[in-house]
Amino acid sequence: MATNTLKPLTVYGHWGAPNPYKIKIILEELNIPFEWHVIEIHEVKSEEYTKINANGRLPAIVDPNTGITLWESGAIVLYLIEEYDKEGKLSYKTAPEKYLLQQWLMFQVSGQGPYFGQAVWFARYHHEKLPSAINRYLDEIERVTSVLDTHLTTTKQAYLVGDKCTYADLSFVTWAFLAMGLLRELGQERAFRQVYKVQRVDGAFE
């Protein structure tokens, strides 16, 4: 389906939430038209929005071209790639690369996103400062980042899979940006440099 014949997808997001921007990056890279619908944080559990996303989280999309409503950022990324990246601009279509991309996306949604998010929550928003909780999730930022760093160093690749920037690389970008801001705020310079290095190496800032 040519992108110039597509009806715009609706993306439900918020300026302060990293996961919707992960979807926005993929849509922009694939030149897919979309409309950005802001859901305020106090609205995510509203009756109106939970009809779209039963979990009451961001993001969600509605695709009028296929009639699909979808939530969970990893599921949305895979849907967009399968439905709209037929030429493989951000993906590979054959083994083993196809499955390695899925592996790294699963690592992002199960490792990077939740742990980085908890670090931000306990450092900035929890009603009391709990150093043990903050340090636990700061350690997880370093651990998750070290997995990426070790892989890129060992393979001597610029990207997680293959010789081009893919959806796997892009999926790590928004949470990494958020983490770098938090680490600077907390004076965690060593961890900041580690996250910055990985994001530079895998080409996600290009």
Image (cartoon, rainbow, N blue to C red):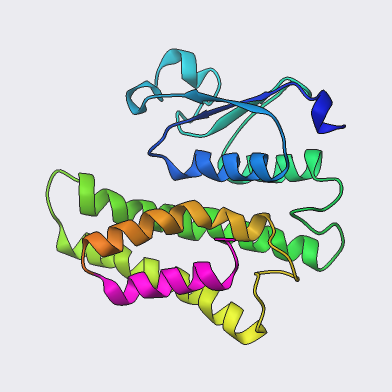
The residue sitting at 64% across, 59% down in the picture is 168
* Magenta part, dominant SS: helix
**Residue 194 on the magenta span:** yes
Q: Is residue 88 above or below residue 144?
A: above
Nearer to us in this view, 131 or 82 = 82
Instruction: State which quarter of the image contains the N terminus.
Output: top right
**Residue 189 on the magenta span:** yes
Give the magenta-colored segment's residue range.
188-206
Residue 8, picture quadrant: top right
Nearer to us in this view, 140 or 170 = 170
Nearer to us in this view, 98 or 4 = 4
Q: Is residue 131 above or below residue 90?
A: below
x and y, in percent, of residue 31 in the image: 72, 38
Q: Is residue 150 above or below residue 49?
A: below
The residue sitting at 72% across, 40% down in the picture is 80
176 relative to 139 in the view: left or right? right
Residue 102, picture quadrant: bottom right
